[in-house]
Amino acid sequence: MQILFSTKKRGILWEVETLLFSQFGEARSLAADLCFCVASAKAGVPVLLVAPPSGGKSTVIMGVEAWLKLRGEMTQRVSRIGLKTLKVLTDRLNVERKATLLNEDYALIGSSDYMVEKMGEIIAALSYAHTYQDLGLKIDVTVERVGFISGIQPYWLSFMVQNPVFATHLREKFIRYYMLPMSITQDVDDTVAIKLIAKTLKFEVRAVNDAIPDDFMTSLTLQVGDTRAKRFSRAIANQMSFLSKTEDFERLMHFYAKRLAFEAHIMDRELGENTYTMRSYWQEYTVLYWLLRCGAMTREQIAIRLGVTSTRSVDLAIGKAFNKQWITSYWNGDHKYYCVASDIKRRFMI
């Protein structure tokens, strides 16, 4: 995979200014997200891929599935899992030992609230401890490596973070990767993108001795705590080393560190009287995502991307993004346009 960078130093930070995934053609806008998901799947680290509806989550997940299948690795779609299907799945995992589970929307992973929590518990256990037992359900499964990639809409983050399963399993064992378009791009046909991704992405076998950048470790620690961050960062870095040339590795890890660190901006976690309280800025993130991807837009154009018809709803979301200082506006003739704030552009865009 050829990754070209042009960088310059600002203080102690390296700003990625140019990042080309030109080999991926029309799918290059999703290439960075896909590469991270492939590396995480190969590392056995579960990832929740966060983006609004039509944000490309399903295309990335299907691209990962196609890539793994071409290389003879077991993949399994998991959605609306019930107890009977769960038993069949765990029996298969005992035979295959290495697999990647894929799900387009985490809110629909189980057939009930109980099964959503159960799947979170099982995936967390298999990815971290490689074994899981439930004598009541007659489940006893041991694996070598299980990867898990699931999409999740930012709206559902506000519900998920209040669920006990998030505090006990998802928060500290699942990475949240925030899709932040790095350039203005056109919508891409799913079929074309999946074929390009599966055909283009290649591993380069080389010695793995790269030092993990501090900001990548810090970003992971923010999400999963220090102990798991050390384990996850090395596992992902080992796989990322195969995806990039030696001279590109550090810059690539800096790039991904920013996507992971975005959690500090989209979610607040505070100590309440009896427990932690969480707040998700999902509306602000949704507006930001579409302006990063589409460029400057009018209020009416933003409404189409948000899928709403109420002027009040659009103005509310735009106002919240303004308050976060993620977006700004300007007039062009009689039309008011909204665009990404310059500081955000420098951090996340080419």
Image (cartoon, rainbow, N blue to C red):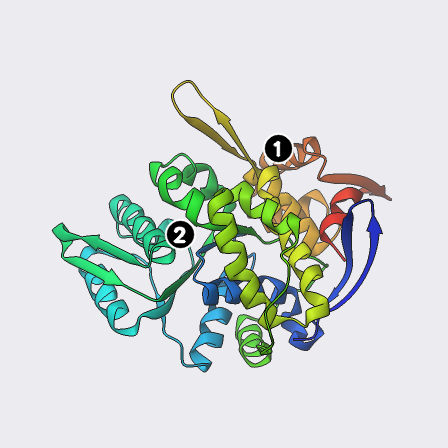
SS label for mark 2: helix
- Residue at numbered disc 1: 316
Disc number placed over residue 277 in the picture, else none? none
Badge 2 crowding class, 10 Å Cα cut-off, few under 14, some 14 to 19, many 20 or more, is many
Residue at image point 55% right, 65% down? 238
Q: Where is residue 185 in the image (x, y as percent from the top left)?
A: 69, 62
Residue 339 or residue 22, whichever sits in front: 22
Residue 294 or residue 100, whichever sits in front: 100
Residue 43 in view, yes or no: yes
Residue 337 in view, yes or no: no
Query: Left of 112 or right of it: where is 247?
Result: right
Question: Residue type at mark 2?
Answer: Tyr
- Residue at numbered disc 2: 106
Q: Please state, as top left, top right, bottom left or bottom right, where the N terminus lies in the image.
A: bottom right
134 shown above or below 92:
above
Q: Position of residue 234 (x, y in %)?
A: 53, 58
Q: Do tag 2 and tag 1 residues touch (Cβ < 8 Å)? A: no
Query: Left of 58 or right of it: where is 83?
Result: left
The earlier-in-sequence mark between 2 and 1 is 2
- Give the total of numbered labels: 2
State the separation of the CA atoms marked 2 and 1. 27 Å
Question: Residue type at mark 1?
Answer: Leu
263 shown above or below 276:
below
Residue at image point 33% right, 59% down? 130
Viewer-side label of 2, 1: 2
Residue at image point 80% right, 44% down? 342
SS label for mark 1: helix
Q: Position of residue 271 (x, y in %)?
A: 47, 24
Q: Please state, as top left, top right, bottom left or bottom right, where the C terminus lies in the image.
A: bottom right
Q: Position of residue 157 (x, y in %)?
A: 47, 42
Badge 1 crowding class, 10 Å Cα cut-off, few under 14, some 14 to 19, many 20 or more, is some
